[in-house]
Image (cartoon, rainbow, N blue to C red):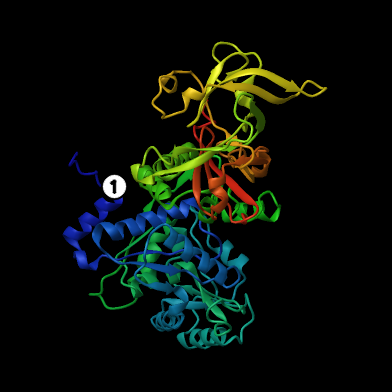
Amino acid sequence: MSTEKKPLNFIEQIIEEDLKNDYKISDLKFRFPPEPNGFLHIGHASSICLNFGLGEKYKAPVNLRFDDTNPIKEETVYVDSIKKDVAWLGFKWAEECYASDYFEQLYNWSVDLIKTGDAYVDSQTSEAIAEQKGTPTKPGTASPYRSRSVEENLSLFEDMKNGDTAEKAHVLRAKIDMSSPNMIMRDPVMYRCLHKAHHRTGNDWKIYPMYDWAHGESDFIESISHSFCTLEFLPHRELYNWFVERVGKPEDLKPKQREFARRNLSHTVVSKRKLAQLVEKNIVSSWDDPRMPTISGLRRRGYTPESIRNFADSIGIGKRENMIDVAHLEFCVRDDLNKKAPRVMGVLDPLKLVITNYPEDQTEWLEAENNPEDESAGSREMPFSKELYIEKEDFREEANRKFFRLKLGKEVRLKNAYIIKAEDVVKDEDGNILEVHCTYDPESKSGSGTEASKRKVKGTLHWVSIPEAVEAEVRLYDRLFSVEDPTADKDKDFIDFINPESLEVTKAYVEPSLKSAKPEDKVQFQRIGYFCVDQDSTSDHLVFNRTVTLRDNWKK
């Protein structure tokens, strides 16, 4: 076994450098800070794996903190789904925290900033404030309310808190530098008036902190050592530092914000706004539709926590955005399910096969290995009878030499069973094949040890016995978009690139061992792909979702 150490990514290099200069190992503490305004998606999974992975590597605590500062969009249902997703991925958080836990402290610190002249109440419209911000090449201009007295600011801010101020009448702004080359530092808004009920604090508050003010201070309160976020927050780092430097004591450990690049996934969108459109326009059935890149959608489709964690680990952490082919995510789930998923028989497009020389009323039970990749998986018994279903595409009356499946006059092996030879077909008046009549070699039973059982034939087919077959609904899911980047063409709507073949629903017949299958059970339909029992499944109506085909069908 190789003892070669995995090279450190640049985030780990930052931490190692900080351990040499600023921090002790006991100072390390991380957090995953989602806003509870939607369902987590595959992009969040990378951030989850990063932060909790660092926690595991350094044996450091990781908080799950909900940045719940916008009561207009946030709901308890999202809180619950996020907790479920993080736990399903296999991670345990040290503390469950909420920015709303700190509303009182954030308000008190804001009062302190007013008293030190570092914050003021602005009574302009949001449009006027935006115009006065200037441009990247032109300095901003000061608000006419920037010079308000401390007393007036304190009085107005208290009115805002008490709900005595109309929405949009005032905001609280930090007083920094209207000529800063970083426009985010040009007196950013810290609070706005919102007379909306909060999912945790109810109607207690009439003002709510902005993300930039709440986020860094929440990190400070929780003693977070490193605040990792995506690259769009790089310009915000200067403001993050400005805020945290104004609270606590000089000797207090202050969190450090560091940024990493997003990893975009091909044939996918992860914008919450765009995902919401897919749901609202009924392009998908729900947020957990198996075509959605949400963690709940991936779970319903049959992805495993290990496959998603392996995917996140394999693509790594970078400093530049890039596009990851969704085929790599599919490879990760194939690789994991290959080790774990029981092999079963299922026929999706049935063609009746009659073995004319098999005893009329006989059913024998043949032993079949559950998973050749896992010796501990054991075996099961499958019924075999005179009448079977095979896949329609596995038979041709005539075919060239490269067709190794069943054709008239030729032999194939039925997996775990016998060698058969196609002798004749029965057709309807339109020429459609209704039945294929075959003969079988009774001495060729798989595993029997006879010379006939060792005989080599080029084709092996899967099948199910008709009398014992269980009818099932099968949902064949594919990529939701037909192009790599649905948002690249600015002249078209991303919805124009929906793959019309992203879902096909068909009736199938599966072996009777699947009668007891439960939602989220995963199997490999041999020669077809990996499937998962859907939550819509019942004891008398099995529903399977295709997780992924056995091979990448999108390869050029």
Q: Is any part of residue 179 visible from this angle?
A: no
* Closer to us: 514 or 66: 514
Q: Which residue is at a point 73% across and 22% down the rendered structure image? A: 426
Quadrant of the drawing holding the N terminus? top left
Q: Is any part of residue 517 visible from this angle?
A: yes
Q: Which residue is mark 1?
A: 9
Image-based side of 36 in relation to 310, left or right:
right
Q: Which residue is at a point 45% across and 38% down the rendered structure image? A: 367
Extreme residue in the right direction: 429
Provide residue 210's location: percent of width, then percent of height. Answer: 50, 70
Image-based side of 449 in relation to 265, left or right:
left
Question: Is 442 above or below relative to 3?
Answer: above
* Closer to us: 492 or 247: 492
**Amino acid type for the residue under numbered disc 1:** Asn
Provide residue 251's location: percent of width, then percent of height. Answer: 22, 75
Element type at marker 1? loop
Crowding near the residue tagged with mark 1, few <14, some 14–19, many ≥20 C-alpha atoms within 10 Å: few
